[in-house]
Image: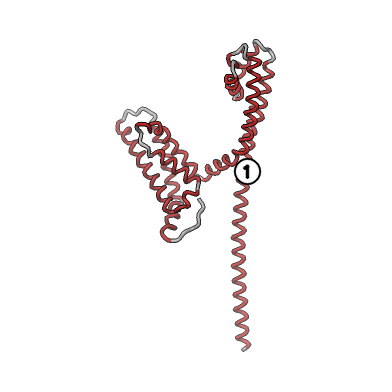
Amino acid sequence: MTVDRQTGWRGQLVKFVETPVFLNFITGLILLNAVTLGLETYPVEAEWVATLIPVVDTIIVTIFVIELLLKMVAYGPRFFKSGWNWFDLIIVSVSLFPDAGAFTVLRAMRILRVFRLFSVMPDMRKVVEALMKAIPGMSAILAVLALMFYVSAVMATKLFGGSSEQFASLGASAFTLFQVMTLEGWAMDVARPVMEDYPFAWLFFLIFIVLTSFAVLNMFIAVIVDSLQSKHFDEEEERALEAEAEAQEDRDLLMAEMKAIREELKALRADMNR
């Protein structure tokens, strides 16, 4: 998170929570927590292991809470201006609910803590930010895909509904066409049984696959790649601007020093003439 540098104890605290050692420590705890949460899904015969895992989990959650408190104190109100800080706060807050009563379902959501890697690892954070940036373009593609699905489902229900339960209704047709789009057993499980009654049904399925799997879905990849490239170019431009600003500061400093030297030389010549 980019913040204005502060002086005093708060500035020192900002430097501490942004040091690579602290960030690597938190990253290691997240990975360790992922391992312990995974071990809880296995039946463990050793009693000491079953006792140790909850203790380790509690210690890790406590450290996460302390980390967030340190950041709140260090950044002040600016802490809540970062979406990633809100993300960390929500993830850790879920871990604080008790594992009993109405909150039992939240026990499974503790694995969401692993997603904190997105906020502490810059490379992962860039990918997520690029995906979020691509959502507007993806929404338009989703609208086109939904329209294709609706038209195709209606056609399939009208054409094949009389001979196949897979196309008996609009919902059943949409689900079957989704299987066809994924190319999972579409030929043997869907197309060939229908072709026994409708020999030219293969034409319908081929057109649907070309339009959805090979065309529209590839547009998702194109939008995401374009978003990643755009973010990369933005970062390069930002670094170029920062380098230009630093170079301008160096030039201004050099000009100021040269001006001071000229003033000193002028004063020296004046003294020599006197």
Mark 1 falls on what kind of element? helix
Is 198 on the left or on the right of 47, as rendered? right
Task: Looking at this view, name the residue that lies furthest to the bottom.
Answer: 274
- Residue appearing at x 60%, y 82% in the figure: 268
Residue 169 position (above or below residue 4) = above
Query: Residue 200 vs residue 93: left or right?
Result: right
Say which residue label 1 marks. 229
Quarter assignment of residue 141: top right
Q: Quadrant of residue 187?
A: top right
Residue 219: x percent and y percent?
A: 65, 34
Q: Is residue 189 at all visible to an observer of this figure?
A: no
Q: Three-letter amino acid code at disc 1?
A: Gln
Q: Quadrant of residue 149?
A: top right
| Residue at x 44%, y 51% (from the top left corner) | 17
Nearest the viewer among 132 and 202 is: 132
- Horizontal and vertical percent for residue 105? 40, 31
